[in-house]
Image (cartoon, rainbow, N blue to C red):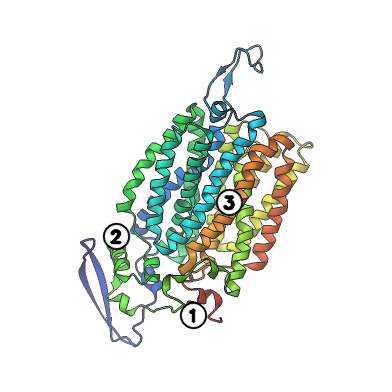
Amino acid sequence: MASSVKVTPVKDIAHLEEAHYVEEVDVRNDKIKLESIFEGLGSFGRFQQIQFILICIPIAFVSMHVMSWTFVVSPARKICNETNETRIDGCEELAYSASDRWEMDGDNGWIRATVQAVYFIGQMIGSFTCGVMADKIGRKKVLFWCLVLQVVCALLLIVAPTWWIYAILKAGTGFTQPGIYGVAVVLGIELVGKKYRSFIAVIANVFGVIGGVLLAVMAYFIVDYRLLHASIAIPSLIFITYYWMIHESARWLVSQEKYDDANVVLCATANWNKKTIPKNWAEKIEKKMDVTATKKKDSFGVFDLIRTPQMRKRTIANFVMWPVTTMMYYGLTMRSDVGGGSLFVTFVTSQLMELPAVIIVALLIDRLGRRIMYSGAIFTAGMLLLASWLTHDLIPSQYAVIMLMVAKGAVSVAYTVMYTYTSELFPTVIRNTAVGCCSTIARFGAISASFIAFFLVDRFGRIVMIIPFTILALCASIVSWTMLPETVNQQLPDSISEVEGNKI
């Protein structure tokens, strides 16, 4: 089948940049697949690299906000006289914490758990709202406004006069977390070719680790909790510039039939990557008519997650995986010293354990697949927690701590894989809604982890963390293995009918 090709440079009106179009004529079937356009522009070229790094930087600050309460509420460190370091008399306080200011020790210990729980309630509301809105109005708008809200709430935390006002402001920062991290991962997955999709959540998680380590280092040297909040909030002001720096997802724009806006993004991609795009591609693109749609294109909602058999099966499985993995992840991070040791040392070690975890994910996720990686990792974490508890009195304490740190690493593997896996299981028209709903359900696990880590462990011991975590980890492993398909090297679905195999 012969065809002649003519390459003509044109001006992109919106950006006044040069783009290159390839005009295809005399082709028997002139329909163009959307995936072929993205692949032709480069799977992970200069444009994608710059855009993805930009959207990952705020993730480090999100990580700081999530875990800052661990140090903000930590009792003041003290320096005592050399003769008796345990004496209260003669000790000098080294820190001014929220726990000291609002008297959260002893019988008021429930306040510490409540503040962190309120943060996760904010996350819960944000997960649903941001997920749905990102599918309705676009990824970029949700990301930007969440960045603005996070900066405002973070600055106000510095001057909060009471613990309940502080908790409300923490909920505000919690609301923005899924709108930044979750949307960034989805935007990144839609930005690159399928060859690189598995690395998106991995790289995003690395930025989260960087944020966690920086938080611990800052908390060690910055002894006033208000200054600690200021050191997190003030640098975040730079993210206001993202309104002019970040592009909308071209894949989402096409799914909404906003071809002019999509053309702007594709032209920018072509210019940065020095690639070409087909001329008049919007007229030739292969339309994927979703046979599940009964109304106009923006009518997809939460009900569509359970309306059809395959979507329902995937949704139920994810609604088990997400709260379990989230509860274990935050529980083992917020109470990293549950097995003993210094809070600062165990926290940093817990964060650093995520680095080998993401390396393992990067090396094996495309070789072993998403399903076996998630199921195996969460199963391993559960078994290590149980082994740590059973052998705690039989082996030196440092070995028990090591087992807990490795368990945290295994949970980090599962957590990283889970974001990629879920994003690939659901179609473009409802992907952010699906991830948002999963993240919403996950907050029940995070809220439970708050009360377990900050209240119940102090009252009843580590068993109230180990046994529930172990049992639920086994359940999540079984559900993911038996109910979900493998998605490795599969084309990203754009419509619900693709998930259902057009058999509805």
Q: How many marks?
A: 3
Q: Quadrant of residue 191?
A: bottom left
Label located before the other in sequence (2 or 1): 2
In the depicted structure, whether residue 64 falls above or below residue 32: above
Under mark 3, the amino acid is: Arg
Distance (Cα) linking label 2 and label 3: 39 Å
Q: Residues within 10 Å of mark 3 (few under 14, many from 20)?
A: many
Q: Is residue 393 left or right of residue 95?
A: right
Q: Residue at x 70, y 51 (%)?
A: 382
Residue 76, can we see it?
yes
Q: What is the crowding at mark 1: few (fewer than 14 residues within 10 Å), some, or many (at least 20)?
A: few
At mark 1, the secondary structure is loop
Q: Which of marks 2 and 3 is in front?
A: 3
Q: In this view, does 455 lie to the left or right of 362?
A: right
Instruction: Depth check: give the residue in front, 377 or 332.
Output: 332
As measured in the structure, the alpha-carbon distance from the residue carrying label 2 to the one carrying label 1 is 36 Å
Residue linked to disc 3: 443
Sequence-earlier tag: 1 or 3: 1
Residue under label 2, please give it.
272
Q: Is mark 3 on a helix, strand or loop?
A: helix
| Relative image position of residue 290 (x, y in whole percent) | 47, 77
Callout 2 amino acid: Trp
Residue annotated with mark 1: 291
Task: Give how far across and how far down residue 234 sits, in percent.
Answer: 38, 37
Amino acid on which the number 1 mark rests in the picture: Val
> Relative to 238, is 50 above or below?
below
Q: Give yes or no for contact between labels 1 and 3 (Cβ–Cβ under 8 Å).
A: no
Q: What element carries label 2?
A: helix
Which quadrant: the C terminus? Answer: bottom right
Closer to viewer: mark 2 or mark 1: 1
Q: Distance between the residues labelled 1 and 3?
A: 33 Å
